[in-house]
Amino acid sequence: MLDALDSRLLTTMRAHPRIGLTELARLLGVARGTVQARLDKLTARGVISDFGPTIATEQIGYPILAFASLQIAQGRLTEAVQWLTDVPEILEVYGTSGQADLLCRVAARSTPHLQEIIARILASPAIQRTDTTIALSTQIPFRIEPLLKAAVTPPA
């Protein structure tokens, strides 16, 4: 659970990703030590998963974003995931319920390149079928701020 200060801290960090601790403390109206302690706590709890920059794949030559749903051969999930780990264009993989077993977020240089990636994925005997959808536009980019506000626990 988050309290109001945690929520404000995380929202401010998202708005100003290169902000220093002293400036962050000033904006929040708390001591620098409080900010450091909160960051340490949130990191230890796994709330903050990284401090790295967000990379725009289209700006590094991968303008195609696709989502590939994969059906895996029974009992071969670990093998399939190991195979997918070796495909650099696969950005994320989620285990899912429903008809597909895995959902992959894929970046590609072009549609022919995407076809090559799908062929590479299907080269694994652990992967039986793919269903791929190309994203045409981003209607709502990744966001966390509304959830941070909703996650604040009411004071006891």
Image: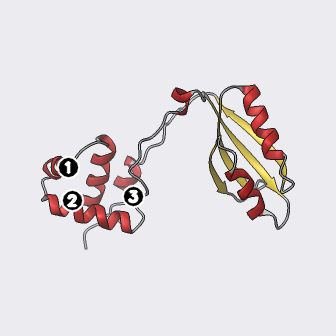
In the displayed structure, would residue 14 be above or below residue 2?
A: above
Look at label 2 and name its amino acid.
Val
Task: Find out whether the residues at labels 2 and 1 contact each other: C-beta distance under 8 Å.
Answer: yes
Q: Earlier in the sequence, mark 1 or mark 3?
A: 1
Q: Earlier in the sequence, mark 2 or mark 1?
A: 1
Q: Quadrant of the N terminus?
A: bottom left
Q: How many angstroms separate mark 2 from mark 3 (CA)?
A: 14 Å
Q: How many angstroms separate mark 1 from mark 3 (CA)?
A: 16 Å
Look at label 3 and name its amino acid.
Ile
Task: List the residue tagged with mark 2.
Answer: 35
Look at label 1 and name its amino acid.
Leu
Q: In the image, is 23 to the left or to the right of 14?
A: left
| Residue 63 image position (x, y, % from top left) | 60, 27
Residue at position x 69%, y 25% from top? Answer: 110
Total numbered circles: 3
Q: How packed is label 1: few (under 14 Cα within 10 Å), some, or many (20 or more)?
A: many
Out of 67 and 37, give the one closest to the viewer: 37
Q: Circle 2 sits in a helix, a strand or a loop, which is it?
A: helix
Q: Name which quarter of the figure residue 98 lies in.
A: bottom right
| Residue 67 image position (x, y, % from top left) | 68, 41
Task: List the residue tagged with mark 1.
Answer: 24
The disc placed on residue 48 is 3
Q: In the image, is 126 to the left or to the right of 46?
A: right
